Image: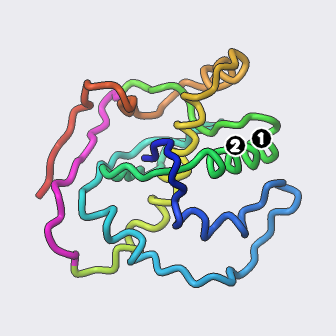
Amino acid sequence: MYELSDECDPDLDLFWDAFPIDSSKARMAPSEVAVNFNDMLEDIVKDGFYHWDGSLTTPPCTEGVSWNLMKQRLKVCQRQVSRLQEALGNSQQGVTVNNRVVQPLYQRVVVGTTTISKAPQYKAATYFLAPLVLVLAFSLAALLYRGLSSNDAQAEANSTTRGDIPLPAANDNSRPDVVVKD
């Protein structure tokens, strides 16, 4: 989860040079920057995370997505948010968000970990990289969504409301059903 700040996230800046602003220019290319995801994730994972099975946040909102939400909030600056918003608008027919309204929990279980006091025996990137990238993108998009005042964007986000899991808003003190595992 991100919160808007005057500070930019230096880890996100590692990816922006290769991040396509226009979907017509998107291509698979090796990165010129070596990124150590274990180092990047080590401090984030130690504060714990939430896990649940949910769905995509954009149509067709397909089920079967494994979500991991880190408990620690990171900082993101307006420049980084604007860059993501521009790229989303260019790649999603003008829709500058990739999330939708909070969905009912139904029978899903949200599992929360406690603080991890020592490094796990496995490489964190092995288990958390793909879900973390999804969570980071989702978190940035959620931040963008909350900041939008356009009713058209709100209507677009509200038009697909099937199957996702609710997440508390940053200022929401209510909590989902959480199962804590040690």
Say which residue appears at 75% left-offset and 77% top-offset: 29
| Helix, strand or loop under label 1 | helix
Q: Does the magenta stretch include residue 67?
A: no
Q: Nearer the viewer, residue 125 or 149?
A: 149
Q: What amino acid type is highlighted by mark number 1? A: Gly
Q: Are marks 1 and 2 in contact (CB under 8 Å)?
A: yes
Tell me the tag on residue 85. Answer: 2
Q: Is residue 139 left or right of residue 33?
A: left
Q: Where is residue 131 in the image (x, y as percent from the top left)?
A: 45, 59
Magenta residue span: 105-120
Marks 1/2: CA–CA distance: 6 Å
Identify which residue is drawn at 58% across, 29% down.
147
* Side of 28 where 137 appears, left or right: left
**Residue at the limit of the structure toward the left, as seen here:** 182
Q: Which of marks 1 and 2 is in front?
A: 2
Q: Residue at x 22, y 33 (%)?
A: 177
Q: In this view, does 100 lie above or below 42?
A: above
Residue 116 placement: quadrant: bottom left
